[in-house]
Amino acid sequence: MPQLSIIVPTYCEAENLKNLIPRISQALEGSDISAEIIVVDDNSPDDTSAVCQTLAESFPIQLITRKQERGLSTAVLAGMDAAVGEFLLVMDADLSHPPEAIPDLYAALKNQEADFVIGSRYVNGGSTEENWGWFRKLNSRIATWLARPFTNVKDPMAGFFAFSRHHFLQVREFLNPVGYKIGLELLVKCRCRKVVEVPIHFADRTQGTSKLSFKEQLSYLRHLKRLSEFKYRNYAYFVQFAIIGLSGVFVNLAALSVLLHWLIRPVAIAVAIWISMSTNFLLNRNITFSYAKHSPILKQYIQYCGSCLTGAFFNGLTAETLCRTFDYFDQRTLLAAFIGILTGMAFNFILCRYLVFAK
Ligand code: GDD
């Protein structure tokens, strides 16, 4: 039974694999680490699979070829599902992650200094190539900053990391990443407490091209949404609900400014309210509560309108009750109205979450 399973996702990496596998083998030579290498290839149209099969004659490689699925994160999960080692390590095929650092990552786990270890560009001693342009640096920094609510590690975007299979199996059923950031998914979900970052130099690939497209970057936002719902649950839904509620104010005012040219004021106001309520409904259905977007829309819409009316009722009731009951609010109508808005929103949210868009 190998101690370490090294998982390498590949898509069109024939040239890189020829260098990577001997370098991994060399890095492990002289150490007492017994390892298996699992290459997960998504049916690359180049020679990746043939190269891998040839290499497998000399190195302990298992090739998994996926024909129905594409994607880095799910490829890594497929590799982890097939792995038998005590520890799992993930790295790119393009040699941006130095195989020579594998023994350091492994040692941190084996000596129990860490539950989860990352080959990190952004700790002391870590680095990237000097020629990174400002856009690439900014992109990487923004992506890292967006992950802040989930983890304090310096390089949560890293694709070079290791942890125990035991931790993986404990959370396997909760893993549902989209896009590239399988490391972040595991950091958030794997219940690892001691996370250690080992400095590495992140080299730019010299063969082939990156597959990190704009579409993958959008997937990262979808992934963050999923992670926030996993970690923060109702708070995450509420924040999305509130942002969409706020956007409704702008839709309302924009619609009103147009409608006032054609309709008498009371009718224009009513139509603008209906328009903003409807756009809010569509946004909440497709974004905030997207898990319910396949339920019958008409029923949801009618319930949503009812929920908004209920919210508006409690909004008015709260403001009026505060002003009538407390002298303090009698002089501060706007503050009472604001508390009314928050109360109405809370009622509306609860009805939406547990009735209109119930799971
Ligand atoms: N099986 C499979 N399927 N593998 C894939 C796919 C896919 O759809 N897309 C990419 N890969 C493989 C590549 O072949 C490579 O081995 C590894 O995943 C990384 O893909 P790249 O496209 O080279 O990623 P990158 O260099 O832009 O992104 C790197 O930087 C990130 C940090 O900012 C990678 O190192 C990421 O892992 C890392 O998170």
Image (spheres, helix red, strand yellow):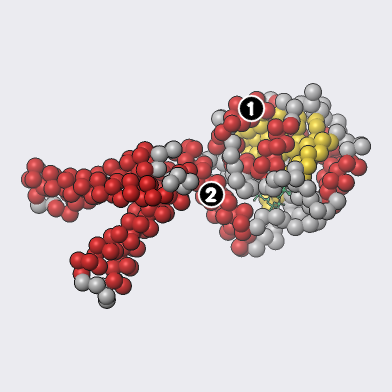
Residue at the image point whose x is 55% and y is 46% from the top: 223
Residue at the image point whose x is 40% and y is 39% from the top: 358
Residue 251: give x, y in percent of width and height. Answer: 34, 63
Which residue type carries mark 1? Answer: Leu
User: Which disc is residue 221 wearing?
Assistant: none
Q: Quadrant of residue 276?
A: bottom left
Q: Quadrant of residue 257?
A: bottom left
| Left or right of 173 on screen, residue 48 | right
Residue at the image point whose x is 74% and y is 32% from the top: 82
Determine if the C-beta at disc 2 is less than 8 A from ligand 1.
no
Residue contact between numbered discs 2 and 1, judged by CB atoms under 8 Å = no
Front residue of 116 and 264: 264
Q: Residues within 10 Å of mark 1 (few under 14, many from 20)?
A: few
- Disc 1 designates what residue? 169
Q: How many marks do you count on the picture?
A: 2
User: Which disc is residue 222 wearing?
Assistant: 2
Front residue of 324 and 163: 324
Q: Give the SS element for disc 2.
A: helix
